Image (cartoon, rainbow, N blue to C red):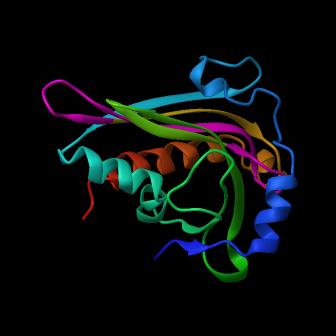
Amino acid sequence: MAVSDLPAQRATMLRAAPFTYNEVGATADGRQPGYEWLERSAPLTRRDWEGACADLLTWRLHERAGLRVQASESPLRQDTVVLLHLGVGRASVPIPCRVAYVIDEPTRCGFAYGTLPGHPESGEERFVLERHGDGTITVAITAFSRPASRLAKFGGPLTRRFQHLMTTRYLRALDRP
């Protein structure tokens, strides 16, 4: 799968849509009341910092985790909109998001995106790579969310389980060739 361009008209519509939660940028602040909280990290086996950051910021993490990706920009920047698709064809679930902020520091790179109308959940997810003094790289994922669609509400504990499964896929995705 390759990242594809999000059609301009759709990108304009998504950029105009409000986030579906009020706490924009709050993945940097810690737990948010009223939401489920997720925080996981893992070391990468790869040591190429620039390549890992490029893979993260060009949506390869999402692509390698099994999502179809349509993005307004790649590499991403603040306010980039993305339409992720889980599944195939008409049975796929659309997952619209907008990048809330980008992290660009000498030893940390990453971003957080927030949910837009049509996303099954409401909340924010952050993806951060950190380079340590010994050359190792860690990927960390932080998210807060609550069900926003009937599908997510009906799924109950299965929805949470699926989110944990996707997080595991994300944590492994940057070590794939």
To which quarter of the image does residue 55 belong? Answer: bottom left
In the image, what residue occupies the spot 76% across and 52% down? 120
Residue 6 at what x, y percent from top left? 67, 71
Q: Is residue 14 magenta?
A: no
Residue 86 at what x, y percent from top left? 61, 66
In the image, what residue occupies the spot 81% across and 34% down? 21
- Against 141, is 37 above or below? above
Tell me the quarter of the image containing the C terminus. Answer: bottom left
- Against 147, is 1 above or below? below
Please identify the dominant SS of the magenta region.
strand
Residue 128 seen by the camera: no
- Against 10, is 16 above or below? above
Start-end of magenta stretch: 114-138
In the image, what residue occupies the spot 17% across and 24% down? 133
Residue 156 seen by the camera: yes
In screen coordinates, is 128 left or right of 122?
left
- Against 101, is 99 above or below? below
Q: Nearer the viewer, residue 90 or 61?
A: 61
